[in-house]
Structure formats: C-alpha cells, structure tokens
Image (cartoon, coloured by chain):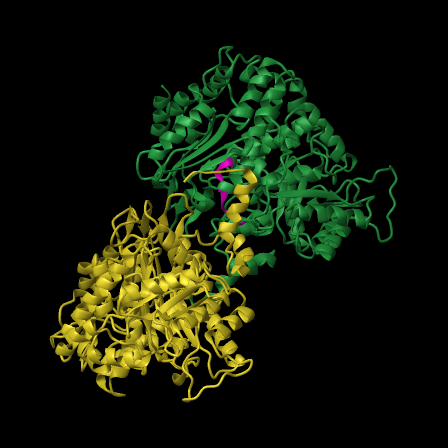
Chain colours: A green, B yellow
Amino acid sequence: MVNETQHTCSASSSSKSDGGSSSGSESSKDSSRCSTPVLDADRHERLREKMRRRQDSGDKWFSLEFFPPRTANAAVNLISRFDRMGAGGPLFIDVTWHPAGDPGSDKETSSMIIANTAVNYCGLETILHMTCCNQTKDDITGHLQKAKRLGLKNIMALRGDPVGEEWEEEVDGFNYAADLVKHIRSEFDDYFDICVAGYPKGHPEAESYEADLRHLKEKVFAGADFIITQLFFRSETFLKFMKDCQAIGITCPIIPGIFPIQGYHSLRQLVKLSKLEVPQEIKDVIEPIKDNDAAIRNYGVELAVSMCRELLDSGMVHGLHFYTLNREVATTEVLKRLGIWKEDPRRPLPWAISAHPKRRVEDVRPIFWASRPKSYIYRTQEWDDFPNGRWGNSSSPAFGELKDYYLFYLKSKSPREELLKMWGEELTGEESVFEVFTCYITGEPNKNGHKVTCMPWNDDPLATETNLLKEQLEKVNKRGILTINSQPNINGKPSTDPIVGWGPSGGYVFQKAYLEFFTSSEIVTALLKVLKKYELRVNYHIVNVKGQNITNAPDLQPNAVTWGIFPGREIIQPTVVDPVSFLSWKDEAFALWIEQWAKLYEEESPSRMIIQYIHDNYYLVNLVDNDFPLENCLWQVVDDTFELLN
Amino acid sequence: MVNETQHTCSASSSSKSDGGSSSGSESSKDSSRCSTPVLDADRHERLREKMRRRQDSGDKWFSLEFFPPRTANAAVNLISRFDRMGAGGPLFIDVTWHPAGDPGSDKETSSMIIANTAVNYCGLETILHMTCCNQTKDDITGHLQKAKRLGLKNIMALRGDPVGEEWEEEVDGFNYAADLVKHIRSEFDDYFDICVAGYPKGHPEAESYEADLRHLKEKVFAGADFIITQLFFRSETFLKFMKDCQAIGITCPIIPGIFPIQGYHSLRQLVKLSKLEVPQEIKDVIEPIKDNDAAIRNYGVELAVSMCRELLDSGMVHGLHFYTLNREVATTEVLKRLGIWKEDPRRPLPWAISAHPKRRVEDVRPIFWASRPKSYIYRTQEWDDFPNGRWGNSSSPAFGELKDYYLFYLKSKSPREELLKMWGEELTGEESVFEVFTCYITGEPNKNGHKVTCMPWNDDPLATETNLLKEQLEKVNKRGILTINSQPNINGKPSTDPIVGWGPSGGYVFQKAYLEFFTSSEIVTALLKVLKKYELRVNYHIVNVKGQNITNAPDLQPNAVTWGIFPGREIIQPTVVDPVSFLSWKDEAFALWIEQWAKLYEEESPSRMIIQYIHDNYYLVNLVDNDFPLENCLWQVVDDTFELLN
C-alpha cells in the first residue's frame, strides 16, 4: 500500500484513523499514553463498518441468534456454547428479548445479562433485541441506558407482540418498530448501530406485501443501519424480496435469516409462531421421518446448505444469519460445509479480548488470571481506564470484591457429583490432593478411573502450551509442588506459531518461563535457600493466605513475561507478573480451595479438613526466569529444592 | 533483598516508592499511563537524597564548579566541556552567578542560561549560584521562578560582594545568605535543594572564626541542605573546620572545595579575591617554576591528589567539590588518579537523559534525532508530557519551530574555515558531495588531506555502533546513497555489551536494522521498484523537501526499532521510527543542507547551487528491516537498487 500524501494531509489523516470517529470521547486522553498499538483495526470498528468492510473485500460472514435460557444452569451452558461457537468467527451474535422474562433485569437469565456476558466475557460483537410495544418511553430509555453502560453497541429494534389479543395504537406511544428506531436516534444519537426485521413474505399482520415493504422502508429511513430477515424456505423468496427492497430505495444491507430444520416439533412450533407456511416439498420429506430426529436434522442441514449456496452464489448476499434455537450441531455443520466457519488459530493477543468499547484498547493483563479470564474481567469491570499497565501504583483502580463464585458465568460447568468423582469422594491426606493435581496434568484417570478434566483454578483441560511442560509438571506435582499456572520460555518464535503465536503475521513472540504453584511451608523454606543462588536470574513472589509476602522483585514493578515484536509497530507486552495485583489474585486463588473444593465435603469431615489445612498453611509461589534465551532454569530450581530436602 | 511485609503494607509502600514524594504533582496522571518502567532510581531523587545514598553506600563522588563564559563561542566550548566532563560521572556541577554579567537574563552567556543548558541539554544535575546583596525580593523571586521553570532544582545561596566599598545593612533587605535561604524556603517551600558556603578559615569579613561558624549554623538552620567550602590548602584546615561545625550542631553534609593549582597567575588572582594566604611551603615550590605552566600544573595535580587522599582517608569526607576555573585537564587528571572519575560505558537508555524534572520519565524518542539530541530536546521543550509515545496522534504536541541554528548550543563547534576544509572549498558536482560523505564514513582524509570529523547532521565522528556498518556504508555513499543515520540489527545481546548495550545489567537488548539517507529521485524510483519485493519485511518512508511522502507504514503507527528486556521489569522501547515526527525531522534535515553547508559559499556560487540543487531535488529515505533475527536485508535492498539502475 503506497500512500502519496502531502505533509499536512498525512498528519491529519493519521489522527482520524487513530482517534476513533465513533465513540471518540477518550481520544484526547489516549493521545499522551503509551497505549495499545492498534493490533486489529476490527476492534475499533462499528458493526456496520465491519459489515461494509467484509462486503467490500468479498469475505463472506455469518451471525448467530440465541434466546435467553430459562434457568441459571442453562445459562452456564449457553455461555460455554458462546465460547465454542465464537471460535468459528461469527461477525456478531444476537440475543432475543423476552418481554415475559423480565428482559432488562439483572437476573442471570435476562436478555440484558446474557447479552452483557456475550460482549464482556466472551468478547463477541453482540446485538441486543428490544421490543417496544406496551412499554413507556422511560422504560425503553432505561433499558437503552443500561445496555450502553454494559458496553452493548447494537440494538435490534422490534415492535414485539402485543400482550392482549386486541391491540390499539397509542398516541405518542411505541406503535411500530420505526417509533423505537426514531426514539433511539433521538435519545442516543449515533451511539447504537440499529438493526430492524424484514419479512420476505411480508409481515403476517401487514395489509399487503407492498404495504409491509413500505413499513420496512420507513424503519430504515428512521435510522436503521441494516435489516435481518425472518426465516424463509426458498432462496427465491429472499432474492425477490431483496430486489423489491432495492426497487423502492432500501439500500442498506439485508441479511437473510437462515433456519436449519433441526426437528419436527421445533419446526412446527416456529411455523405456528411466525405464521409461515412450510412448502409442500419439505413437508413431503419430513412427515415420513418425523420421529427420526437424526434424519430430520440431516435433511435440515442439507436443505440449509443448498439454500445458502444459492444465496451466496447470487452475488447479492454477503452474510448469513442463523436462527440457532440455542443449539450447536446443525448450524455448525452447515457453516463448516459452506466453508465459512473459520477457526482462526491466530490470536490478536495471547488472551481473548473483551468486546466492551471501554476495554477495546486493553493490551496488558497479569498472568495470574490466564485460566480465569472471566473472573479478571469481572473483577476489573469498574476500572475507568484500559490498559492499566501500572498496577504497582497507589492510584491504580482496585480489584472488585471476591464474590464471583456466586456469579453464574463463573460457576463450574461440572455438577458436584462429577467434581467429587474427579477430585475424590474422600481425601486421605495431602497426598490425595497431590494425586488429583498429577492426574489433571497427565490426563490419566485417577484411581477410581475418572479423568480429572478441570481444577478449581482451571475450568478446562490443560492448554496445548502447558502440555509442552507436561513431563516436568507431572514430576513436581507428585511431590507436592501443586502447579496452577505455567508457561515455557520462548525466544522469538514466529507470531504465526500454532501453539505460542499471537498477533499479526511477520512478527516474533517471546516469553519468560513462568511457574505458579501452591506448596507447603517446608518446601518454601528449602526453596528460599535455593533461590539465593538464582537471585539475579529468578524473580519470585511467595505469599500465604494471611498475606505474608516474600519477594525479590525490584520496587514492586511489573515484570513483562509475554511480548511480541511486529513489523511497523510498537512492542506489545500483553502479559505481566505484577506484584500488586498478585495480592488480589492470592485472595482469589486461596478462596477457590474452599469455595470450589472444600465445600464439596461435609463440614468437619476429614476431607474438608485436609483442604482447609492446605488453604491455611500452604504458600502460593510464582517464579519467573528472566533469562529467556537460555534453557528454563525453573525446573532446576525445583530439583535443587527437593535435593536440599532429602 | 527479602521483604517480609503484610499485604496492605506492601501495596502502600509501593505507592510511596513510585509516586515521588518530591514534585509529585504529576503522579496521579502517571498512574494510568503505561509509562516508563523506572530504570534508574537516581533519576527520581533529589540531590540531597543522592548525596545521602552515596554516603550510605560508601561510594565516593565529586562535583565540578564552572563560571559563565564571556562570549558565545566560549559558551559553545564550555558546553562541549560539560559533555566531556559529564562522562566522568560528577554528582552535580554548579554554575556561578556573576552579578555584573546580567546573570538571570536570556543571554547565551548568562549564569541562568548556562545552568539551563547543563540541566536540559547535557543532562547534568546542576546547582545555580545566586547572590542576594543589592537585590530586591522581587528580583530574587523572579530569578528563582525562572530557574524553576527551566527545570533547575538546586540553588547555592550566597550573599555576594557589595557593589560599593561601604556597605550598610538594609532593613528587611537581603543582608546575609541566611536571608536568601529563608526567602527561598518561604516562597518555594521545599522545592529547591539549597547549598550554602562554608569558610574553613572563617570568612575574611567575619569578626572571628567562631563568629563565622555561628553564621554558618544560622544559614543551615534557615533551611540549607548542605555546605560547600571555600578552597583551602591543607587537609587539616578542612578536617578541623568540619569537627568545629559538628561541635556546634551542624550535621548536614559539608563538601570540601578543592582547587588544583593550574598556573601561577590564576593562583595569585584567586588568592587576592578570596583573601586567603598561600602556605609558605607551596610558595617555595611555585616561585622558582612560575614561568613553567606545565610544571606548575603537575605540581598542582600532585598536591591536590595527596590532599584529596588525606580527606577521603579521614573517613569524614564522601564527596569532593572541584573549582575547575572552566578548565579540564588538571581536574580530570586529579579525578582519574583518585579513581573517582568513572566513565560508565553502561547507559540507562540508548540516548542521554535530560535532567529536567518534567522529562525524567521520558523513555522513548524518534530515532531521527539520534545524532542531534540537543535539537530534539529544544524542539520538544514545550511538551507537557513525557514520554509521548504516540506521535501519530492528532493531539500530540507540536515540534518547536526550526530556528535552532541560531541557538548557540546547537551551533557547530567548528568555525567556517574548518568546515570549508572538511566539506570542500569548492564543489564541482554532486560527486564532490558524495566524497565528503564517504570520507566522513571512512575516516580517511579528503583529497586536500583534511579529515571530515563532522557533518551537518552529526557534530561528532562516527559512533562506535555505526562503525559496525562502515564497509557497507562506504560502498553506498560513494554511489550517492548519502547516509545520515543507521543502526545494525541486534538479536538479544547482553545489556552490558560495551557497544550496543544499555539499561540495567542482566537484560537483553534488541534492534531492528535502520538506514536513513538522502538520495536522488532517480535512485528513489529504482528503490521503490525493489522495495515491492520486500513489502512485508521492510518499512519505508520516503519524502522530499516539499513533503511529498511515500510510505508503506501501517496506519502511521510508530515502529519500535530499539528495545530491551530486563529482569523484573516491563519492556522498554526507547527508540522508534515514527511516521509523523519524521515529517518534522524532514524539515530540519533538509534545512541543515542550506543552513550549515550551502551558506558556507557565496550566494549564486556554483558550490552553493550544488547544495541547493540537492536540497531541492533529493529525497530523504528511511528503511527498517523488521526481521531483526535474520541477516540485515537493507544492504541487499540497496544492492538490488543499484543493479536495477545499471
């Protein structure tokens, strides 16, 4: 890309590309900070801009619709699904608005909170649906303000179904989605991207197809940015609709809503609700196999794939919107067969970026929460300023309180019985705890034949990167160095490395070796003697639950342990060992022993007492080997410690 | 160092060590910035704290006194002397106050401006003398405010000599140095460190030695932080004085003033002014050799060394203050023989840090001014905020205007005749210019037998680091790639490396290869074709005097080209190639052709026209090879370009 620009133009154009035309309120503050080198233009773009860019580049995309679950457990599962389906690269997800389910409340199953979780904790661009009928302006404004506060940037503006059978227009009330669009624009200016619904067959209540098109135009002209359509069964239906829209002057993107048939009953119910008619040729196939779920799903996938292909091949469709019904298999299958499910192993940063607009420039985090990113996001949600690269400072914002075990999206995905199978129905001593850690590392089943697939400090099986250290980790866990976090040293691997790579291509990534573990005071005493030999090479922090803290860190400064060097950019250092936040992490790390593990057992039971003993007496230790170009010395440190103890 | 601290203590102690107790007004602003990892605690300390720390650690130190020169040329030379003598590691220098020389003015020879230059441009901790007799409070306050504004933090408070023969005390006026000390404390609180003068033999005007000691105590108790003494000839004189001071309760540091005898006449003059008596044994040696300057200086060095040894051996003396009389040789010799002249090859950052309190956290600069650091400091002096790591931002502060050729401390140290010898009495074409560049690179004499030791863009001979590239540089300059700045790529050398190392020990330093040069549009055309092949690897900026700008830099972001990884610290990236500041540098780089070179010749002379032609038609090019772990490809780029041209 060669830009020939005049001096002044060049300087000012830079300011525009940098300052952020959209929510530029923080731009002046950003200016004097040595803040994030913009890794990914994507992070700064509005949804409508992303859509336009993908359209311009011919890069096809998809989006996923979910509805809020009924129970807290279902919500936990849905959020795991967000993480898994987010990996395929949806341009956005959207969460429907259920007026009967207290959708704007703080309940863990409300539309608002599910959307909040998707944006902030899963890092997904998210559209929150909102219906307006039977609502006051104040209600709506309140919901919108809350959505904005939570970092939501996109609204799907709908009329919604009237509550009673009969419905009368209210003067000055919200009678149509267009009223809601106008309200959003008048109250929030250009803050939200607004989506409206289109009906390829016309809205069932509209006087006519043409009248409905005129309504749609009215909604768009009221300020909507794009249209998502109701489901349909034939590509011709959509393509005709699209041409008709264009003919009357609707020029914004129109995204077809795709419904892969996943079962006989769900289809019937949807058809009833949407008042759509299922084409005879589909009925003919389905009726005979209506009790064979797998067969219906296969057919549904087949049908959706061929319809999507027709849409994409038409050249008029750039993105596909999927009605998932909160299910995973059929939609994923369709997307994979279409070749638009794109699991990108490249990560812009080593950790997942939150999609909250305030956090979009966040570029550095303490390593401690590496396996608990949602907890980190939760505990720093009140911070005004990201990145905060200087935790070791009195004026750095405080970490939120430790009440996160009660947050549904931080709850373990495994029920109590499963955890007991993994972590032991009955513990006989500290050694039984060592065994649990060892089984988690090795992936081997425990003595009762159960694999340990999660730990209180890590909800997921061992990361690929940690696997690089498996052998050594196994050895030390067996002997009571109970590891909860680690990374190998890396001396300049390509940024495209499938295991340790991150950031734009053409760069090099680096790491200092890191090891974090719980261990007994006996081992700590020996370790401290050994560490004297490594004084200039290894930085350590050793702390117990009471906060007794032993360290050789200079001036309590953060130690960068992961960084990357990229073409034409400033250095990026996304992970640090920060002495001050370590003390906040310590509280959380120790509490997890009790909250997640000890409480599985009866009060005063021997098993519970063992965990309580460890909680009260063990130390949490972290070690950094600063000599990243040399062979990691931390294993030698641990070996020396065991040798000293023998 | 093992700190056992409770959680809260540890967190709050960090804030204190970080926040800066002294001039902490900006500390809250610093907090949320990803700002300088403190490389050197020294940079944050007040002079009195530095003194205390050196005393505690038993690390002997020295300081140097200078007086303001009479002429602008002498000032330019004195500033070079500051740079050279600064390399030996003085704890501070001080600049005397000459009431008759308009000492507080903006003249290039005023005490104020010389002290300003020492602090801001030479990075030296500096004490400005100030006398108070015959001055109004408003005058004094004005001087102090100006000193503070310029970044001066230390004042030597003196009474000064009355103007007339007779002198009467003024009521409420400044009659004694103690009045000045009180005034500084009352008007500026604790902002300044204050030094006062002590007289080991008693002040010549004092009623008695004892009365003078009481006056000294009064000055100290008025708020002085330490004492520097008048010169003396025998160590006993000082040691007795020090004990007498302690006996009456003076506990602050007392620094002996050392005067190495450098010549017969200067000694006589000083003795006359100070009303001191030269001991007979010294007179006996000097009188016979009074016309042999070298012999007297040798004797003076000998005498000073033995007296200083006695002082240091007494255990009561931690630092020595030298009256240099603006001369270099004798003092340097004494310091080297005492072993306290410490040229530290280790640099805290790759470039010299300014000692201005506002700039103490500055940790990143554009590479362009690498050979013109004083110009960079001058042109960014109005910036509110350091470091400013985001030049590529509309709200970044502007660079100061290009009027710096007129600033005495940016003037070439070489007179016109010398420059003409180096750069050619008469140019015959562009090739004569190529020759000058080539001679500068090789160090070989030009065809008239003169070595080229400086260039308009570089006042000094080639840096050791650039020497690593000498062979290639010679080759390309001969062919019209006129290099003005370059650095080799470095892939993780120890931070203690004598040539490319910087920062604390135990770290690793890195560089991307950089090459900056002027060249013709013909070569640029070929170069651009070649660069297409290196599109992903090499970032370039190519600009002519009119500002026509060709680049492949993504989003005009800065590209870090020098960085360091250190134990227990964040990454430090002190040098960047920044596209926006490059356009400010461009103005300066092109102007130097005219201001420093073309103007050596008569208007309309062929030589002048040649330089003017280059100025008007050549391009300024910079190239960065992003693949620092591989062999530098920039030479290949240049070779390919020449090949294409052939």
Answer with left or right where residue B613 lies relative to residue B549: left
Of A93 and B435, which appears nearest the observer?
Answer: B435
Quadrant assignment for the N terminus of chain A:
bottom left
Of B312 and A596, which appears nearest the observer?
Answer: B312
Quadrant assignment for the C terminus of chain A:
top left
Q: In the image, is residue A586 above or below residue B550? A: above
Residue B65 screen position, x and y as percent: 33, 71
Residue B540 screen position, x and y as percent: 35, 60
Examine the rendering and report whether any part of residue A473 can be seen.
yes
Write down the quadrant of residue A382 in the picture.
top right
Answer with left or right where residue B143 lies relative to residue B314: right
Of A452 and B63, which appears nearest the observer?
Answer: B63
- Residue in view at x 40 percent, y 74 percent: B208
Answer with left or right where residue A465 lies relative to residue A184: left
Examine the rendering and report whether any part of residue A305 can be seen.
no
Residue B285 screen position, x and y as percent: 15, 73
Number of disc labels: 0
Q: Residue furthest top?
A: A448
Q: Is residue A270 magenta?
A: no
Q: In the image, is residue A427 above or below residue B554? A: above
- Residue in view at x 75 percent, y 36 percent: A98
Residue B70 screen position, x and y as percent: 32, 83
Write down the quadrant of residue A264 in the picture.
top right
Q: In the image, is residue B334 above or below residue B204? A: above
Question: Which portion, as a residue range, is magenta?
Answer: A361-368
Answer with left or right where residue B638 lies relative to residue B28: left
